[in-house]
């Protein structure tokens, strides 16, 4: 048994490490096999229809497409929220972010009382690293940085190294997807779309640039070297040495690699925009930065093979929410209704892959899963039992991998702003701005074109009752009732 020491406060959270007798296929597994390396890849604002493996015939993602053929591909995988920060919190805690005050982007932070996946795995002997976008708190209390960093946001200081990560190379929030530390002084000189909000051509002369205002940080130190070119390459240049070192030391590793692509502003190098020269400038940069990111996924996969650890690495890929902008923007929902910030499918249904050679059978599933499922799934795989008693919204997908779970035993609940929704194996209940409930059969009608609420009033009533109980549970969590030793969080989600 291991007691979790959380920021110098010892909580009565007991983690029992169990030895699993068999692997997924019923074959007795060694301890090394039971403890796979784990990599969580995530894109920022990548739409459900923005990759080749999701049917996009414009954007080029050959490495992700190849990975998809070796993965279990989820056609109904949901981000916990239609914006980034809450979804990211769900990945690390297995809990809906309304339980701890991360209601939206740039709101709240990951509180010290939350138990993160990085902390659990580090206590199991893993070396842990975060690379890319963090957005779960500020990274400095000393200098102005990003959206909230510095003295102005000191109350929200909650960097990766305070949340279970041994090493990080992280930004608080967004950066341009090329030359991430820079913006043009004169956006018109580089064709900056809508005053730099959307895109610009790469800056050739540093004299024409000014600081973007967001910095990369490594465990409290601002990074100043190797920050030019594709941001996805800049990030992977830090993740791969971390993986190499862990492999050389024969230690299991947990690597969270959260790309910025294709969050605005999208900027792609000339070799990538040239691949889409028959498209608009905005599309060239949007598609180009996705292809540049895909190239780095290929680089990662090749490195895992070279190091001899690919066979014992569980890799998950997803997006944090749907695509930015309206229907004229390049991001694709694949025909789903709604986009980023919406609880319709286009805002929360995201591309998703999970691969683990010999353990997760490649194929396609319409099983409804969520980013909140990462923690319960991984702790079961590594043989850890969490006995802290706090509610978690995710479930373990291990029975699904084994072919033992055909339907989700508990629904997935959502809340964002003035929207609320509940999704089970077939039905989805949605309400916006305290209006009437809408009910959709998202298996038969994934585009949510036919409201069936009037046809099934009893189902609406039952699902609404479930949602109400879930909201009450979240209110209790937010008040600190889940923490053995706690201070109530601030903020009001409802």
Image (spheres, rainbow, N blue to C red):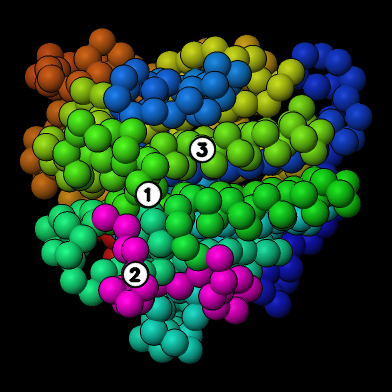
Q: How far across and down, in percent of the image, does residue 259 sit?
A: 47, 49
**Depicted 369 relative to depicted 183: above or below:** above
Q: Secondary structure at mark 2?
A: loop
Q: Which label is found at residue 269?
A: 1
Which of discs 1 and 3 lies nearer the camera? The answer is 1
Residues in magenta, as a range: 201-226
For the residue pair 14 and 83, the one nearer the viewer reads as: 83
**In the picture shown, does residue 131 fall above or below 465?**
below
Residue at horizontal 77 percent and vertical 14 percent from the top:
25
Quadrant location of the C terminus in the rendered image: bottom left
What residue would you read off at disc 3?
A: 295
How far, Cα to Cα, is label 2 from label 3?
A: 26 Å
User: Which residue shows up at 51% across the image and 37% down it?
Assistant: 295
Question: Relative to residue 387, is residue 230 drawn left or right?
Answer: left
431 inside magenta stretch: no
Q: Residue farthest to the front?
A: 205
Q: What is the crowding at mark 3: few (fewer than 14 residues within 10 Å), some, or many (at least 20)?
A: some
Instruction: Give the percent coordinates (x, y) of residue 194.
Output: 12, 58
Q: Would you say residue 202 sits in the magenta stretch? A: yes
Q: Horizontal and vertical percent for residue 420?
A: 24, 42
CB atoms of marks 1 and 2 within 8 Å: no
Residue indicated by mark 2 = 205
Question: Residue 345, percent across and down?
Answer: 26, 30
Q: Is residue 179 visible?
A: yes
- Dot 1 falls on a residue whose secondary structure is loop
């Amino acid at each position: 048994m291991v007691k979790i020491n959380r920021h110098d406060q010892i909580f009565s959270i007991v983690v029992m490490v169990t030895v699993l007798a068999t692997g997924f296929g019923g074959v007795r597994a060694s301890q090394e096999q039971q403890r796979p390396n784990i990599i969580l890849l995530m894109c920022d604002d990548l739409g459900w229809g923005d990759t080749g493996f999701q049917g996009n015939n414009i954007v080029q993602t050959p490495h992700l497409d190849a990975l998809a053929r070796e993965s279990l591909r989820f056609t109904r995988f949901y981000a916990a929220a239609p914006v980034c920060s809450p979804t990211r919190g769900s990945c690390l805690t297995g809990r809906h972010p309304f339980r701890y005050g991360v209601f939206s982007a740039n709101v709240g932070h990951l509180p010290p009382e939350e138990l993160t996946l990085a902390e659990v795995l580090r206590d199991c002997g893993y070396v842990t690293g975060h690379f890319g976008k963090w957005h779960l708190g500020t990274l400095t209390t000393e200098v102005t940085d990003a959206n909230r960093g510095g003295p102005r946001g000191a109350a929200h200081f909650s960097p990766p190294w305070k949340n279970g990560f041994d090493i990080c190379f992280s930004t608080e929030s967004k950066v341009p997807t090329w030359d991430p530390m820079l913006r043009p002084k004169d956006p018109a000189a580089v064709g900056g779309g809508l005053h730099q909000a959307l895109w610009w051509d790469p800056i050739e002369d540093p004299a024409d640039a000014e600081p973007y205002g967001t910095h990369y940080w490594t465990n409290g130190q601002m990074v100043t070297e190797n920050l030019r070119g594709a941001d996805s390459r800049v990030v992977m240049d830090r993740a791969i040495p971390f993986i190499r070192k862990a492999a050389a030391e024969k230690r299991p590793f947990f690597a969270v690699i959260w790309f910025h692509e294709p969050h605005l502003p999208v900027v792609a190098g000339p070799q990538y925009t040239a691949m889409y020269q028959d498209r608009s400038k905005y599309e060239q940069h949007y598609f180009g930065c996705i292809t540049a990111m895909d190239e780095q996924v290929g680089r990662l996969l090749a490195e895992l093979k070279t190091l001899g650890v690919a066979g014992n690495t569980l890799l998950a890929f997803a997006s944090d929410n749907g695509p930015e902008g309206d229907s004229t923007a390049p991001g694709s929902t694949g025909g789903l209704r709604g986009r980023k910030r919406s609880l319709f499918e286009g805002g929360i249904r995201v591309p998703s892959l999970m691969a683990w050679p010999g353990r997760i059978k490649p194929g396609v599933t319409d099983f409804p899963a969520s980013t909140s499922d990462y923690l319960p799934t991984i702790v079961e795989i590594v043989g850890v039992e969490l006995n802290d008693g706090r509610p978690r919204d995710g479930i373990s997908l291990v029975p699904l991998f084994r072919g033992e779970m055909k339907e989700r035993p508990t629904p997935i609940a959502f809340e964002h702003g003035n929207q609320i929704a509940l999704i089970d194996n077939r039905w989805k209940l949605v309400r916006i701005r305290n209006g009437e409930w809408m009910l959709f059969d998202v298996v038969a009608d994934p585009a949510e074109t036919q409201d069936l609420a009037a046809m099934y009033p009893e189902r609406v009533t039952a699902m609404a009752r479930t949602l109400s109980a879930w909201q009450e549970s979240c209110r209790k969590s937010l008040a600190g009732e889940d923490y053995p030793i706690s201070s109530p969080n601030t903020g009001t989600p409802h």
